[in-house]
Image (cartoon, rainbow, N blue to C red):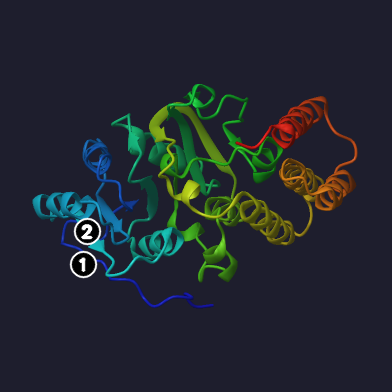
Amino acid sequence: MTEPVPALTPFPASTSQTENPVISVCLTTYNHAPFIAQAIESVLAQQLNVSWELLIADDCSTDGTAAVAASYASRFPERIRYRTNEHNRGGVSNWLHALDSAHGSFIAHLDGDDYWTDPLKLQKQLDLLQQHAECSLCYTNAVLLSDLPHKQGLYLNGSIRPVHHYDQILRQWRVPLLSSSMWRRQAMPKPWPEWLWQSLFPDVGFFALLSLKGPFCFLNEPTVAYRIHSASWLHAKGTHVEKCLNVLDLLDRLDKLFAYRYRHLFNAHRADQYELLACHYLEKGNPLRFARYLARSLWYHPLRSPSALRRGYFRFKHAAKMLLMPSQ
């Protein structure tokens, strides 16, 4: 299948030093003027014993991001390939086009509002992937940067095996952070499935596709600072209901992708999304839709774990409180 939008602005040709790099770093950005310099500097600070390139893909920023990125590209032409789109194409299209333009045998990603904190991040991941030839991807832990007290600390706190399959991700529903990840270019599908272009959560589908080519290895070290803020791409896309429905569609596609061998795990996540929808319509005072989505949630996952029951209790308690709150 072909890309559902017109072709994006191409990247400039590689220089002799980056024509056949071992590692390509794809940095995608849109209106990240306060953060982009720190992100680029964290890539340039990487200490590597192999050749590498940096691709900066700007999706027609309007806040000065392009000027900062272009300045770095002019200063480091032997290292950086930069392009900005003539029109905004959307985060998924901008990202996948950058991946298709990378020349490295290994690819790492960095969002323009995140930055790497460990100058040996890429080298450590390269070493692990070379040691574990069966693995398609390596990811690390990260530090959360947020003004919200409940979203601080480490991104991953659970017990994760150093080498594991996708079912562990489904059990914990803690998808690897893209800005912490490096993978083999040969593990990426060609062409990209059409549904990936339409997803509000393309990283979830992307990691599922990579897992078909081999397990993942995990480095439990925080090598990335991950920003959580209201201007991020995910916060700007879709209403609460649209996001839930988009996740449900994605779960159906991934369930089929894995030939239904993880159906019980996907059903638990389906139930969670229907529970979120039920809480939403309870809060909005719509009893018919509340009952409809609550019934679907219970049908997909009737036997809840204690933690799931506690989560549901507090969700419905909050929704009922919002329903009864007098309007301003």
Return the residue at label 2.
81
Residue that appears at 29% across and 66% down:
85
Location of the N terminus (image quadrant):
bottom right
Image coordinates for residue 41, horizontal then vertical, percent? 21, 38
Task: Give percent across and percent down for residue 39.
Answer: 28, 40
Look at the image and tell me whether residue 87 can be seen: yes
Q: Can residue 18 be spotted in the picture?
A: no
Q: Are marks 2 and 1 in contact (CB under 8 Å)?
A: yes
Q: Amino acid at mark 1?
A: Pro
Relative to 263, is 135 on the left or the right? left
Q: Residue at label 1?
A: 12
Question: In which quadrant of the rendered image does the C terminus lie?
Answer: top right
From what the image shows, is residue 134 above or below residue 12?
A: above
In which quarter of the view is residue 160 placed? top right
Residue type, mark 2 in image: Arg
- The front one of 260 and 252 is 252
In the image, taking residue 133 as reference, residue 296 lies left or right, namely right
Q: Secondary structure at mark 2?
A: strand
Q: Earlier in the sequence, mark 2 or mark 1?
A: 1
Please tell me how crowded label 1 is: few (under 14), some (14-19), or many (20+) other residues with Cα within 10 Å.
few
Residue 172, horizontal then vertical, whole percent: 67, 35
> Which of the two residues, 245 or 131, is positioned nearer the viewer here?
245
Left or right: where does residue 88 sit relative to residue 312?
left
Q: Alpha carbon of mark 2 to alpha carbon of mark 1: how far?
A: 6 Å
